[in-house]
Amino acid sequence: MATAASDAALDCKRPALEESVLPALLEMRGIVKTYGAVCANRSVDLDVREGCVVGLLGENGSGKSTLMKVLFGMIRPDSGRILFQGRALAGHSPREAIAAGIGMIHQHFTLVEAMTVTENVMLGWAAAGAVLKPAEIAARIEATSRTYGLAVDPHAIVATLSFGLRQRVEIVKAILRGAKLLILDEPTSNLSPPEVAGLLGVIRRLREERHSVIFISHKLAEVIEICDEVVVLRDGAVSGRTPIAEATREGLARMMVERDLSAPVTRSARAPGQAVLAVEGLTRRDASGATRLSEIGFTVQAGEILAVAGVDGNGQADLLDTLAGILPAHSGRILLDGRDITRMSVRRRLAAGLAYIPIDRGGTSLVPGMTIADNLAMRDFDRPPLARGPLLDPGAMRARANERIAAFDIRAPHGDVQARTLSGGNQQKIVLAREIGRKPRLLLAFQPTWGLDPGAARFVIDQLLLLRDEGGAILYVSAELEEVLTLGDRIAVLSNGRLSSPEPRAEVDVTRIGLMMAGAA
Amino acid sequence: MKDPVALGPIELSASEAGAPDAGALFQRLGAHNGLRATGRAVVAVLLAFAVTAIPILISGKSPIAAYWALLHGAFGSFDHVAFALNKSTPYILTAVGVALCFRAQIINIGGEGQIAVGGLAASWVALNCGDLPSLLAIVLALAAGAVAGALWAGIAAVIRLTRGVHEVLSTLLLNFVGVLLVSEALNGAMGEAGAGFPQSPMFDEAVRLPTLFSGYDLHVGLIIALVVTGCAQFLLWRTRFGFQLRLLGGSRAAAAYAGVSFAGGVIGVMLLGGGLAGLAGGIEVLGVHYRLIEGFSLGFGFTGVAVALLAAANPLAVVPAGLFFGFLQAGALAMQREVGVPSSLVYVIQGFSIVFVLCAIGLDRRWQRV
């Protein structure tokens, strides 16, 4: 079957997608998975043909992750069949999925930072043999990397590689292990615009070499650009399936959320107030002495959003953690409402009106194993009204939880539920409720929409704009150029530890910002 | 960790939909978390007894007779019960301290050294308190034990914070030092002249722990242990310090973000854990032996860790877990005497119980993660 259709499959170019000729690579039929009362997948069908890129869209909690975990053998479905290359997969483990030819690139990479690329590729790979032959593997990495335009150096230590390069190492790893089907889970989340373009090029090469790709993303533009067809999940069921030629952004968004999201973000025009945050000559070095922040200076005014664009690893986390008091500054001054807070502790900065939404929900802004009430109290637990002297006040904590659950529409019956049981969007609402709920003077927000579906992301953005309209100052740091342009009253770029001079949004040149994010200008 | 109340019934149906496994069994034991955890522990213990029956059979003895002797030895008379309760007391105290450390993800396995040093300090006070009133002398001696234990654990905390040496290593090594300090003292200044065995002279009647019922050996240490357990539970869930510990245990990054000091937490919880172990040492010498004896702390520290594990680091659960170990060991001697099964088999039961409980906890975690 595969030989007969191989010539036709090589012609798999959009939009001439002829369903009858391309051999099926993957058929998932009637996948059902329930978690108690929650039905994560209700009879989902998914087909992937050889040499095709299938976009998998859906809000958080729509069942995408569950479906992919079923496919990769991480969880077992209650019922349903999986046929891969004509062979039934049932009750398989991830190891068996890999052996069958399925590769999954997780959002969080599974690389050992202290090892080289070659060592990482050999790690846990039975086919590498009992006696390792690094030179041979390195040659294969180079060959593969050339074939797919990946440009990976087999001898580089992973710790020295950027996020985008690490992703490519994962792709090489999967291909060498014989992956016919690659599952890419939100692969563009942390990439700069040029890196995204590079990744899309790699995906095109994969398609030309007759690999298939399942591309999971929230970004409709990328899905439309790269995919051959799109499958949309909503509430655990397929709500739409369309060849890409017939897809529009609006149509896809509607299939995802069953409501129109096209209403533009509204923002009132307002004259900037006085400076709330003033930073002068802020410099920070890490433990190894490398400069992470170099002579950074800027102000954020009341009722203003300063949006800072930049790719991860260019000092964003250092900047925000230093402003929040988690990391020390080596020189420079930080003024909040004219008060010097450079040497203040995290707690005193909080009391001075500084709120912070870090990027990592999994273990920094939230503790998944703690209850909603505890998470809401996490940064205020040692002050009235949540504490009386050395004791906690459970009544006050419960009352605050109930009030915030209602005010921020957190989907949970009460505050005694573990945060881990909530969806990403609802978890972020807990963080927002805690940080915005105390009416801060200044909010530091680090990619607060990361990993959220459009509906939840919109909620976050609306909350930030509300805070701005009430006179709060916001420093918004993100790798998502579109969000930076939507939100920022003024816009700057942080690249390699240096901050460009902020420009009003009306005067911004998008191309130049993209280049600056990539460190090219 | 608090479980969502809603988890019980929801997961029940999930387990019925999937293949029946041990997790489902535990789920069915109760919808409420406390009940479920208890059921889990009971099943694990029963499994441990069942598996230990195999070596008993191999040695040609009847497991039923052996377990009957064990039961009789543990509960057969008020004397037996008193003996077992006294045995449980240091386990409970040490395990509560260890459990608090575990909650903060601090692995304090230095209970033995802390007990030894606590017993040493309490003995020194008991031998040198002169004519102080009885109650004051006892309180002073126990306090000295607690402080010594706390300082002993504090050494490990300081080394961790200043030199980055993991507390597993430092507390483990300090055990040897602590135990040898006791020997050193007993072979020197504190030893009983002409005893032929490294032990101190007997303490005065006035500094011995009072018993709860006249005519029986059961001393007030048990009451102290129970009160301390209640305090630890309150500390963990109802105080700012307890919240800090839970936050540190939940995520170091989240604790830093919340402005909770790692150093403060480590020092605080290590002093607390060491203090409780030191108190246990004091109670052991003042309530059981009435003198300091070489090797009196042997195995107590690790039993404390085992009890804390069996209780899944839950202070309230430490009480039944500690009693289980105490009664088991008390019954072991009877089992050996009457049936000829070596009492060391009791350690097999303990070991299996912990393995099974840990397996059950692991299952539970995996269940909750999805």
Image: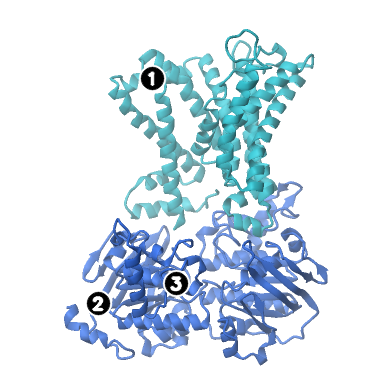
Mark 2 closeness class: few <14, some 14–19, many ≥20 residues within 10 Å? many
A465 sits left or right of B110 in the view: right
The tint chain B carries is cyan
Mark 3 closeness class: few <14, some 14–19, many ≥20 residues within 10 Å? many
Q: Do the residues marked 3 and 2 share a common chain?
A: yes
| Disc 2 element | strand
The chain that hosts pointer 3 is A
| Disc 3 element | helix
Q: Amino acid at mark 3?
A: Gln
Residue drawn 66% across and 66% down?
A: A285
Q: Do the residues marked 2 and 1 share a common chain?
A: no
Q: Amino acid at mark 1?
A: Pro
**What label sits on residue A167 in the rendered view?**
3
Q: Quadrant of residue A469?
A: bottom right
For residue A101, say whether it is visible.
Answer: yes
Q: Position of residue B363 (x, y in %)?
A: 41, 48
For residue B29, say whether it is visible.
Answer: no
Q: Amino acid at mark 2?
A: Ala
- Residue bearing mark 2: A24
Q: Are marks 3 and 2 in contact (CB under 8 Å)?
A: no
- Residue bearing mark 1: B342
Q: Position of residue B347 (x, y in %)?
A: 43, 27
The tint chain A carries is blue
- Tell me how far mark 2 sits from mark 1, CA to CA: 66 Å
Identify the residue at the far right of this view.
A338
Q: Position of residue B233 (x, y in %)?
A: 62, 40
The chain that hosts pointer 1 is B
Q: Quadrant of residue B208?
A: top right
Residue drawn 61% across and 85% down?
A: A485
Q: Nearer the viewer, mark 3 or mark 2?
A: 3
The chain that hosts pointer 2 is A
Q: Nearer the viewer, mark 2 or mark 1?
A: 1
